[in-house]
């Protein structure tokens, strides 16, 4: 007997991707329910070769539902996730609402799957920020080998990280520039077409943005609280996939050859690293793929035990939808949940 799965926010970019991945991976679900706000009732979304009609979240009873994939934003999650969890339906939340709650595990299965067992405290599991997810997948095997002390990361984040509105704005502005029309700025603080913006989320008192703060705090919670990390997060005119330039300092020596071998053997990682034109991965090539790609691995001779590399991943998949479904698979594979119908 399979599981009953609800996808909240099924009409959004990540919600639709969740439905696609559930079907692709043949997730053991007997029923998949698409849920959305009242304005999206009846909207049709694809689930494999089936079409689902969205139901209203406000009127849905989670008593017989096993897993809720939550992708409807922080405010919706704050209101609904505790209520859903109280009905013993496991919420896997894609927002930042519960990431920093000590009673809520923050999970990337390739990195800290063992922490998933703590979900019973609130029946909520948090998905990390998209830029954090791909970073820790790359850092984990290196940290196990040589112990990371400090990370400096600069991100090049696609507009899909800002949702459908972000993608629509890049599309509109690009068309306007080609047709010599007026460029309208709505979603982003400055023009994004043929430009980049060193500002994601709100500014904090210390000058960092909330996006940069998230990467610092989440890396510590997922990987190791002793790691020092500083980030600069930049929005770029790319539709899908986030890229990161990562500089890492280690406690112990690690060579480029050792790092390349370790990363090639690591779960969820693919190394594309030829020192020639085109011998690296780009956001365009990573779109639609599950892996976290690593390229341009090289020694940083300016510090002791330093490496630098390029990291690219599809933010809608590993950064959000795929990671959430991998968490659900971890719960099932470790026999931490059983279908309510079976019970």
Image: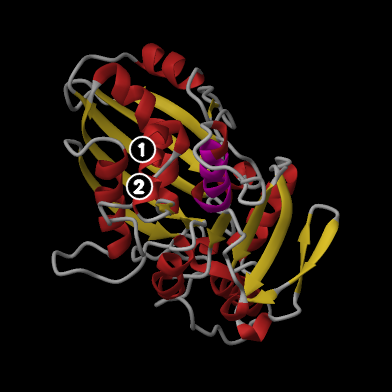
Q: Find the distance from the CA under tag 1 to the CA under tag 2.
A: 6 Å
Let me know if residue 191 appears in the view.
yes
Task: Please state if 87 lies on the left or on the right of 46 as rendered.
Answer: left
- Name the one closer to the observer, 79 or 260: 79
Residue at point 50%, 61% (across, down): 161
Report x, y in % for residue 58.
57, 80
Q: In this view, does 171 lie above or below 104?
A: below
Is mark 1 in CB contact (under 8 Å) with mark 2?
yes
Q: Which residue lies furthest to the front in this view?
A: 343
Dot 1 alpha-carbon crowd within 10 angstroms: few under 14, some 14 to 19, many 20 or more: some
Q: Report the number of numbered marks.
A: 2
Residue at point 28%, 15% (across, down): 254
Image quarter (top left, top right, bottom left or bottom right) of the N terminus: top right
Report x, y in % for residue 118.
35, 43
Look at mark 2 in the image and give the residue it sits on.
Answer: 105
Task: Please state if 165 lies on the left or on the right of 234 as rendered.
Answer: right
Q: Is residue 237 magenta?
A: no
Q: Which of marks 1 and 2 is nearer the N terminus?
A: 2
> Quadrant location of residue 188?
bottom left
Q: In this view, does 237 lie above or below 250?
A: below
Dot 2 alpha-carbon crowd within 10 angstroms: few under 14, some 14 to 19, many 20 or more: many
Q: Give the range drawn in magenta.
A: 320-331
Look at mark 1 in the image and give the residue it sits on.
Answer: 115
Q: In this view, does 227 lie above or below 84?
A: above
Task: Please state if 212 lies on the left or on the right of 22 as rendered.
Answer: left
């Amino acid at each position: 007997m399979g599981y009953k799965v609800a996808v909240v926010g099924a009409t959004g970019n990540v919600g639709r991707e969740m439905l696609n991945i559930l079907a692709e991976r043949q997730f053991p679900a007997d029923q998949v329910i698409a849920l959305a706000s009242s304005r999206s009732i009846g909207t049709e979304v694809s689930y494999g070769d089936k079409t689902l009609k969205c139901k209203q979240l406000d009127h849905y009873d989670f008593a017989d539902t096993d897993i809720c994939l939550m992708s409807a934003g922080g405010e919706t999650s704050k209101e609904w996730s505790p209520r859903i969890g109280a009905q013993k339906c496991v919420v896997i939340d894609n927002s930042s609402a519960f990431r920093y709650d000590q009673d809520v595990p923050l999970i990337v299965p390739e990195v800290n799957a063992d922490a998933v067992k703590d979900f019973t405290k609130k029946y909520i599991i948090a998905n990390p920020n998209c830029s954090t997810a791909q970073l820790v997948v790359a850092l984990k095997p290196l940290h196990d080998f040589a112990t990371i002390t400090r990370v400096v990361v600069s991100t090049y984040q696609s507009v899909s990280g800002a949702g459908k509105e972000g993608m629509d704005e890049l599309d509109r502005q690009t068309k306007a520039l080609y047709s010599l029309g007026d460029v309208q700025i709505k979603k982003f603080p400055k023009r994004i077409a043929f430009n980049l913006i060193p500002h994601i989320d709100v500014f904090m008192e210390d000058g960092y943005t909330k996006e940069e703060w998230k990467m610092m705090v989440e890396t510590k919670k997922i990987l190791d609280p002793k790691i020092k990390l500083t980030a600069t997060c930049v929005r770029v005119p790319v539709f899908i996939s986030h890229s990161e330039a990562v500089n890492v300092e280690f406690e112990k020596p690690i060579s480029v050859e050792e790092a390349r071998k370790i990363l090639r053997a690591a779960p969820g990682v693919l190394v594309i690293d030829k020192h020639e034109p085109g011998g690296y991965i780009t956001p365009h090539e990573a779109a639609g793929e599950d892996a976290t790609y690593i390229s341009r691995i090289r020694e940083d001779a300016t510090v002791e035990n330093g490496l630098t590399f390029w990291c690219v991943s599809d933010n809608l998949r590993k950064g959000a939808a795929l990671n959430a479904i991998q968490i659900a698979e971890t719960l099932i594979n470790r026999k931490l949940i059983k279908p309510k119908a079976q019970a």
